[in-house]
Amino acid sequence: MALVTLLVLFVSGCGSSHQTNSSDLEDYEVEKTIDENVQGDFVFRLVSEKNEYGNGEDVKLFGEITYAGDKDEVTIYHSSSAILFTLVEKTRIYNIEFAVNDIGLSTVLKQGVPYREEYVKTGGYSGDAPSDYVRFIKNFLSNDGFPTGYYVVNGETDFFLEDRERVSIKATIDFKVVD
């Protein structure tokens, strides 16, 4: 019974007509606009150029992978992108996922030279998604900038090396979009 109640509360929360306003955003503090983590010979950075953007302003997000090992270069093997971005708009609790269109791609990383990928808007919804979420995603994809809100970005690089060693590094940043 408790599980059913939690499920009903979650679904009703996702379908609410909640619109973010400045008082909602005051409940959130931006913690970090740069996060960097290391695994072996690889450094992964996730960056938002600002901690606060205006509504309609271009949001500048990027991820970087830097190879810091002994070789002049290495080839990494990954899916659609060497860097994946998942966003959550926290005031509405809306997830903005990435799409994997290809597998088996490769990228050459030169020693000490950051490989950078800029965030490009992606997202979608299923046929049974709440109408408010569908409206949000359509607005997100069709307009410049991001809708007003507090966003947490989870970045990840997940790849294999020629010797089949797997590298998976995650980073998290956040930012606000205000009216």
Image (cartoon, helix red, strand yellow):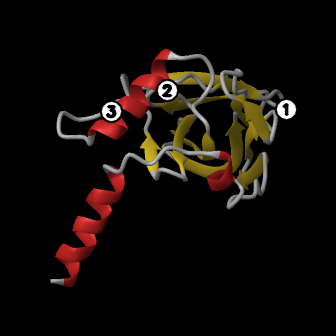
Q: Amino acid at mark 3?
A: Val
Residue 172 visible in the current orientation: yes
Circles 2 and 1, Cβ within 8 Å, touching? The answer is: no
Q: Residue at x 18, y 40 (%)?
A: 128
Q: Earlier in the sequence, mark 2 or mark 3?
A: 3
The mark nearer the N terminus, 2 or 1, is 1
Answer few, some or many: residues within 10 Å of disc 3's Cα (few below 14, many 20 plus, some between 14 and 19): some
Q: Label 2, label 1: how many angstroms apart (C-alpha)?
A: 35 Å
* Quadrant containing the C terminus in the rendered view: top right
| 79 horizontally vs 146: left or right | left
Task: Answer left or right for 155 relative to 164.
Answer: right
Tell me the quadrant of the picture where the N terminus can be found: bottom left
Element at label 2 = helix
**SS for callout 1:** loop
**10 in relation to 101, above or below:** below
User: Which residue position holds label 2?
Assistant: 140
Q: Which mark is residue 112?
A: 1
User: What type is the residue that disc 1 sits on?
Assistant: Gly
In this view, 164 is above or below 11:
above
Q: Position of residue 85 (x, y in %)?
A: 55, 37
Residue displayed at 59% across by 22% down: 107
Which residue is drawn at the image coordinates 79% and 27% (left, top)? 72
Tell us which disc is closer to us: 2 or 1: 2
Residue that mark 3 sits on = 134
Residue 4 percent location from the top left of the image? 17, 74
* Res. 67 in view: no
